[in-house]
Image: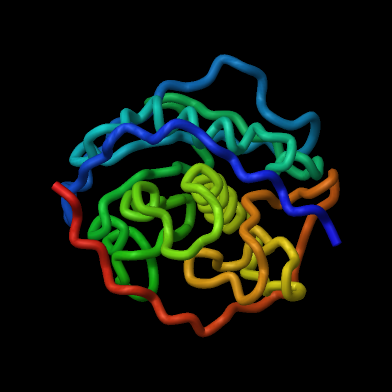
Amino acid sequence: MPPVPAEVTSAPPARISYPAAGDGRFAVASGETAAPAGKKGALLRYQVAVERDIHGVSADEFAGTVTGTLRDPRSWTAGGEWRLQRVGPGAHADFVVRLVTPKTRDAICAGAKDGYTSCRTGDKVVINVARWVKGVPDYGAGLDTYRQYVINHEVGHRLHQAHELCPAEGDPAPVMQQQTLGLHGCVPNAWPFLNGDRYRGRIGAYDDKVPPRDKGNL
């Protein structure tokens, strides 16, 4: 069984405030000057944006977490299928990672309008600010770990990865498991690669109940 990744710890984050419904306008982060993450594979360029009604985190601050996660050697470029690079406003992007209010999440995401989860729709990778701020109850790991998980999970969908199931009681949860809704005996894990190998579960999804939608915290 792969070892459980060490939990990330950090100082308490700055307070982030947001309404339940933003107006759908976004600030786009600057691009990065570094070479793409990954040594080989298809190059995908992405933008990072924050809905303007969200206060306490700038587009560049959010982008730092997104890019730091996607550049980690345990993230999606480890397998040699993809290279990833963040680009700024006006540049061509293959996908956009957005931090959004709960109702903007519902306006963008296909399927049920639950106001709770994050999603990927087409080239839109949507992170619900309510989960970014609060995480999920009884997750079993810190907020930084959850944030890395939700980035890798939703970007994973953009890379055509399907939902997966917990392999066995006590194992790390696959990053494509819907950890936001339940761990089903697994322990939290933010990364698609463990010990240099792609870590997977069986394809499938649980019929978990979605908690009530978030009403904002302004």
The residue sitting at 35% across, 47% down in the picture is 133
Residue 160 seen in this snapshot: no
Residue 154 seen in this snapshot: yes
Q: Where is residue 46 in the image (x, y as percent from the top left)?
A: 52, 36
Q: Quadrant of residue 61?
A: top left
Q: In the figure, 151 relative to 202: above or below?
A: above
Q: In the figure, 167 relative to 136: above or below?
A: below
In front here: 136 or 33? 136
Tell me if 2 is positioned left or right of 122 in this view: right
Q: Position of residue 96 (x, y in %)?
A: 45, 42
Q: In the figure, 171 relative to 66: above or below?
A: below
Q: Which residue lies furthest to the top in this view?
A: 33
The residue sitting at 56% across, 51% down in the picture is 149
Q: Where is residue 99 in the image (x, y as percent from the top left)?
A: 36, 44
In front here: 95 or 4? 4
In front here: 202 or 91? 202
Q: How is the model colour-coded?
A: rainbow
Q: Residue furthest bottom?
A: 207
The residue sitting at 64% across, 58% down in the picture is 175
Tell me if 60 is positioned left or right of 10 in this view: left
Q: Where is residue 38 in the image (x, y as percent from the top left)?
A: 74, 32
Rendered-image quadrant of the N terminus: bottom right
Tell me if 195 is positioned left or right of 126 in this view: right
The residue sitting at 65% across, 74% down in the picture is 185
Number of numbered callouts drawn: 0
In front here: 17 or 142? 142
